[in-house]
Image (tube, grey):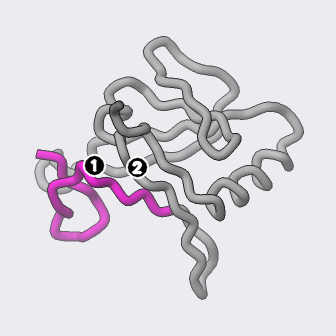
Amino acid sequence: MPPEVLVVTKPAAEHLRAFLSQKGFPLSVRVAVERTHCMGGRGHAYRMEVDEQARVGDVEFTAEGLKFLVDGQSADLLRGTRLELVEHFGGTTYHLENPNARGKCPCGHHDLFE
């Protein structure tokens, strides 16, 4: 059986669920991998946002009781990625730990897949 697109930790799911419940209507979490200009366009960054509906070609799945939407190309790059909640002095953020990344760009902010 192939690995799930995302493995969502319980703290991340609870934080997302609280955020989505404030919006008052059903929403999904969209996760995408996007190319950046870093390393001549070889770097990739992650984007998370709320979305109301799936688009053509999306992979839809439920993790920890939350509905996620991922475009097909991003799903291939994300497979097996762990979504975690990170709390630090400056606030709370989400972190995606991707086993498919081959490394980081020199700035340390973007994953490399090639």
- Most distant residue in the right direction: 24
Image x and y of residue 12, in percent:
62, 59
Q: Quadrant of residue 4?
A: top left
Amino acid found under the numbered disc labelled 2:
Tyr
Label 2, secondary structure: give it.
strand
Q: Is residue 50 above or below residue 106?
A: above
At x 62% / y 72%, what residue is drawn?
A: 92
Q: CA distance from mark 2 to mark 1?
A: 7 Å
Label 1, secondary structure: give it.
strand
Q: Which residue is mark 1?
A: 44
Amino acid found under the numbered disc labelled 1:
His
Query: Foreground: 62 or 90?
Result: 62
Q: Quadrant of the C terminus?
A: top left
Q: Which residue is mark 2?
A: 46
Image x and y of residue 21, in percent:
84, 46
In the displayed structure, does residue 95 sit left or right of residue 9?
Answer: left
Residue 113 on the magenta span? yes
Q: Are marks 2 and 1 in contact (CB under 8 Å)?
A: yes
Residue 10 on the magenta span? no
- Most distant residue in the front direction: 1
Q: Quadrant of the N terminus?
A: top left
At x 57% / y 66%, what residue is drawn?
A: 85
Q: Is residue 6 above or below residue 76?
A: below
- The span picked out in magenta is 95-114
- Most distant residue in the top direction: 56
Q: Residues within 10 Å of mark 2 (few under 14, many from 20)?
A: some
Q: Which mark is residue 22?
A: none
- Most distant residue in the bottom direction: 89
Q: Residues within 10 Å of mark 1 (few under 14, many from 20)?
A: many
